[in-house]
Image (spheres, rainbow, N blue to C red):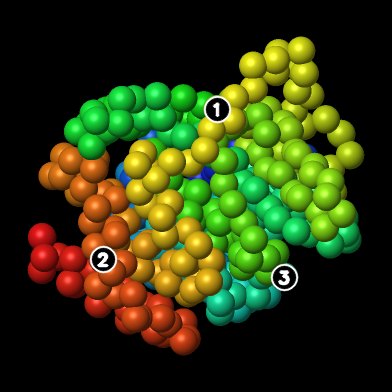
Amino acid sequence: MVILGSTGSIGRNSLEIAERYNLDIETLVAGNNVTLLNKQIQRFSPKIVVVGKKELASKVNHKNVLWGESGILQALEESKSQTVVNALVGFTGLKPTLKTLELGKKLALANKESLVVAGAFLDVSKIHPIDSEHFALWYLLNGRKVERMTLTASGGALRDWDISKINLAKPEDVLKHPNWNMGNKITVDSATMVNKIFEVLEAKWLFGIDKIDGIIETSSTIHSFVEFIDGSTTAHLSGTDMKLPIAFALLDKVEERVLPPVDLMKMQNLEFREIEYNRYPIWLLKNHLLQNPKKGLIINSANDFYVNKFLNKEISFGQISKGIMNTFEKFDKFEPNSIDEVFEIDSEIKKWLKNQN
């Protein structure tokens, strides 16, 4: 298979599953972590390798090295593998998603932004989501009529902070996620609740349901709930490990233990919290986005911009949500009607943001 984002958390877990089930790795795509990439090359012997920038190519211990966006797309075309894991971060993942679907390959998708910005233009029947919440929803569905879906959230690194101090949090505070070890951007998105907004939109496109909500479950053991039309509600529980959704996305069917089962006796202190607007102001946009899901593009473009500024210590944490909300208000009338317009609007929003800041 092909793994886009091999040195990230999802990529590393995907390689562990590949090794466990003897799946060949034809292509590895990484960003800047050449040290880890070289270890992966030695272990998995890929035929094609791609890195983020041309200047890194000479540091890669491989005879067939490509680079940049064009290198990723070329690698997808040249690879014979019919399975692609897209674990790239951000808007960068969209073109590889489009290319994978165009080539008729199976797409195991961990790049949330592809669905958030372009879900209306993707064939979701060809997409196998690598996400604990959407895997849980898929696992729970069994043909019965669904009334509502509820995604769980961890609440992020600042969930227990005094609200008066949250806006002043620094990157080193926000990157201390209580339950998961993830990349920087998604960890920030967890703290703002943008990540859950994204997942709500993903669920909208994947399952075609409008009634989707979120709730904080502090242990991250329960990943989603499905409320059925008959009044019953089911929940999916598993350990805080992405190998299970990855295994199903890659193999379609899993009939052996991937994770240790949840010890129910250790779950006596389950805690649920409401996603409060004063702590997570971005959640105010959730219902509007469910009714206008193409506008997820606006949230994504602004979030990319402001999270980058925050991680570079150019703005405070509170300015991320404020900036996103202001951008959404400015571009609320914009809605893409084609893939081309997705790229055009994203470019226009980011140009405006750069001029404003």
Q: Which residue is mark 3?
A: 125
Q: Which mark is residue 9?
A: none
The amino acid on which the numbered mark 2 sits, given as a three-letter code, is Thr
Q: Residue at x 42, y 60 (%)?
A: 285
Q: Are marks 3 and 1 in contact (CB under 8 Å)?
A: no
Q: Nearer the viewer, mark 3 or mark 1?
A: 1
Amino acid found under the numbered disc labelled 3: Ser
- Going by the image, does 242 lie left or right of 302? right
Residue located at (64% from left, 16% from top): 269
Q: Position of residue 217 (x, y in %)?
A: 58, 32
Please tell me which residue is depicted at 62% across the width and 56% down the height of the picture.
212
Dot 2: within a 10 Å radius of its alpha carbon, few (fewer than 14), some, or many (20 or more) residues?
A: many
**CA–CA distance between discs 3 and 2?**
32 Å
Can you give x and y, in whole percent of width and height, for residue 200 in the image?
Answer: 56, 56
Mark number for residue 218? 1
Mark 1 crowdedness (10 Å alpha carbons): few <14, some 14-19, many ≥20: many
Residue 290 visible in this rendered orientation of the protein: yes
Q: Is residue 354 left or right of residue 326?
A: left
Determine which residue is flagged by label 2.
Answer: 327
Q: Amino acid at mark 1?
A: Thr
Residue positioned 83% across, 50% down in the render: 231
State yes or no: discs 2 and 1 in contact (Cβ < 8 Å).
Answer: no
Asked if residue 201 is positioned above or below residue 95 in the image, the reply reads above
Who comes first in sequence, dot 2 or dot 1?
A: 1
